Image (cartoon, rainbow, N blue to C red):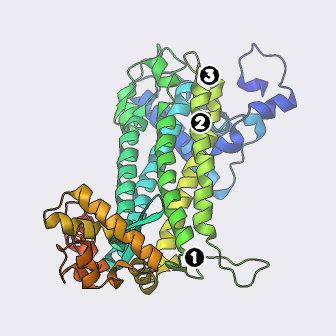
């Protein structure tokens, strides 16, 4: 190891400390980005006359060769390389001799690692973006099928008012859209180049930071070299956006889990995404949504970990930052896996049970608000109507009957405002159809939402 360092070092590292210090075990993930950044840097050094054009070309060729070696498995960094940056530099020197030693002119691993990580994360986020869209499409397809399927709507997990099932599922598309927007917003700050900030203060080498930034597709450069090498806000922001996404996925997961229980039986899990029990032959378990729900823990943990990691750090680079990578890598892997798992679950892993859902909405008092609204239409103040219907519900509960079981005579005993048309008001489909306010669950309104998302998610029809 000592050979990487200046002549100031006489002795090698203690073997345990060498392992403790190394990040090669995980930052090898950044190999492609490290090569991309180094190629951009070498080209820029050539253009700026710091290196000859020939030297820059040779460096680029050497770096591409390492890329091919990595593909064929011939590039095998070791612990002694410490990290991916040293591993690449060392291999380059082995390939090119003294010229390889010129690559690091005008840069430091501090700006280099920041550059690699941002590039890597930007690429991953672009995948995440389109994967969220796939999940939205899966939700859309289910919604499109179930405009007229009714589902009990809950508050406090108590039956509240019936809904179009499409309406319920479309709520998740909205949540995911906010997630997508949040990631796009975070991407703006991920996509700023720290390269050329060097160790912390900039460099006396006449480099062109704008050039490397635009070669690598960054939208701009950090204006302050200290900020450039000490900013990990983008990592925190990304993990925060990921945490909210996971929270959303876990809410959907939780609903699917109880919908699949015998008590609800609102969905049937297909064999493609459910598992059995090793002991109980009758069981079919919702492992997929349970895992998604459970994996929130690690993503929320990474957010907490990153915040704690940067708290109180003096400017500028500190080795603490090495801890950012595993948190980011694991967050990316976890959210991508969970989005995909939920997509597959919705695409082929479950089927709603419309008959059972109808039975559910027909066997409760979730039409009680509509009786109150009926009286309001007849001129009664809402609070008075509300109290009156409360009494009726109490009576029905005592009798073990539903509102629709009351006769017209009984209704008129309660108030002579009631006439025969009260019965159609009690029909769940009618209850749903009447919620015509903007954003409400009326079929017409939900159809508008479906039209909106059909266009937005590019389902032909544009
Ligand atoms: N492996 C290091 C990291 O992940 C690279 C930067 C090291 N810089 C330094 N000055 N030691 O942060």
Mark toward the start of the polypeptide (1 vs 3): 1
User: In the image, is 403 to the left or to the right of 301?
Assistant: left
Quadrant of the rendering where the N terminus is positioned: top right
| Secondary structure found at label 1 | loop
Measure how far apart labels 1 and 2 are at the Cα level.
37 Å
Structural crowding at the residue carrying mark 1, measured as other residues with C-alpha within 10 Å and reported as few (<14), some (14–19) or many (≥20): few
Q: Nearer the viewer, mark 1 or mark 3?
A: 1
Calculate the distance from the C-alpha at mark 1 to the C-alpha at mark 3.
54 Å
Residue underneath mark 1: 263
Look at the image and tell me whether residue 99 can be seen.
Answer: no
- 392 or 211: nearer the viewer: 392
- Please give the count of numbered marks on the rendered protein: 3
The residue located at (73%, 77%) in the rendering is 277
Disc with the residue nearer the chain's start (3 vs 2): 2
Q: Quadrant of ligand 1?
A: top right
Identify the residue under disc 3: 318
Tell me: 253 left or right of 191.
right
Query: Which is more foreground, mark 3 or mark 2?
Result: 2
Residue 126 at x, y percent in the picture: 42, 52
* Above or below 58: residue 279: below
With respect to residue 399, does 303 lie above or below? above
What SS does tag 3 mark? loop
- Which is more toward the observer, 190 or 397? 397
Taking 46 as reference, is 417 above or below it?
A: below
Mark 1 touching mark 3, by CB under 8 A?
A: no
Q: Which residue is mark 2?
A: 304
Specify the label residue 246 is tagged with.
none
Question: Which x, y percent locates residue 274?
Answer: 62, 76
Secondary structure under the numbered disc 2 in the rendered image: helix
x and y percentages locating residue 352 in the rendered image: 45, 80
In front: label 1 or label 2 = 1
Q: Quadrant of the C terminus?
A: bottom left
């Amino acid at each position: 190891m000592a050979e990487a360092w200046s002549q100031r070092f006489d002795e090698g590292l203690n073997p345990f400390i060498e392992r403790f210090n190394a990040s090669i075990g995980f930052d090898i993930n950044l190999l492609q980005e490290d090569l991309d950044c180094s190629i951009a840097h070498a080209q820029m050094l050539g253009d700026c006359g710091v290196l000859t054009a020939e030297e820059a070309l040779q460096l680029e060729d050497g770096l591409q060769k390492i890329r091919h070696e990595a593909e064929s498995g011939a590039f095998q960094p070791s612990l002694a390389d410490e990290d991916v940056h040293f591993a690449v530099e060392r291999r380059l020197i082995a390939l090119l001799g003294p010229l390889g030693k010129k690559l690091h002119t005008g840069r430091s691993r501090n700006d280099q690692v920041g550059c690699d990580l941002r590039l890597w994360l930007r690429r991953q986020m672009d995948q995440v973006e389109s994967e969220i869209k796939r999940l939205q499409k899966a939700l859309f397809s289910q919604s499109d099928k179930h405009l007229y399927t009714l589902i009990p709507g809950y508050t406090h997990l108590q039956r509240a008012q019936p809904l179009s099932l499409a309406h319920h599922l479309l709520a998740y598309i909205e949540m995911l859209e906010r997630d997508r927007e949040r990631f796009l917003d975070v991407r703006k700050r991920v996509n700023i180049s720290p390269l050329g900030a060097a160790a912390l203060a900039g460099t006396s080498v006449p480099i062109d930071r704008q050039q490397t930034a635009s070669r690598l597709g960054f939208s701009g450069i950090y204006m302050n070299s200290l900020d450039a090498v000490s900013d990990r806000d983008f990592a925190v922001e990304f993990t925060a956006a990921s945490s909210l996404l996971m929270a959303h996925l876990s809410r959907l997961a939780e609903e699917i889990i109880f919908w699949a229980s015998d008590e609800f039986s609102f969905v049937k899990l297909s064999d493609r995404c459910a598992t059995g029990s090793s002991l109980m032959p009758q069981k079919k378990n919702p492992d997929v949504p349970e895992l998604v729900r459970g994996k929130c823990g690690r993503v929320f943990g990474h957010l907490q970990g990153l915040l704690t990691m940067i708290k109180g750090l003096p400017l500028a680079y500190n080795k603490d930052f090495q801890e950012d990578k595993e948190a980011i890598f694991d967050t990316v892997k976890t959210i991508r896996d969970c989005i995909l798992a939920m997509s597959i679950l919705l695409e082929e892993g479950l089927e709603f049970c419309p008959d059972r859902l109808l039975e559910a909405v027909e066997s409760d008092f979730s039409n009680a608000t509509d009786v109150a609204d009926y009286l309001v239409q007849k001129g009664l103040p809402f609070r008075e109507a509300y109290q009156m219907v409360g009494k009726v519900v109490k009576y029905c509960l005592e009798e073990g009957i539903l509102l629709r079981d009351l006769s017209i005579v009984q209704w008129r005993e309660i108030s002579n405002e009631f006439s025969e048309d009260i019965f159609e008001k009690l029909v769940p489909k009618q209850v749903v159809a009447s919620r015509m306010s903007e954003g409400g669950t009326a079929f017409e309104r939900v159809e508008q939402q479906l039209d909106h998302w059909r266009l937005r998610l590019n389902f032909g029809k544009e």
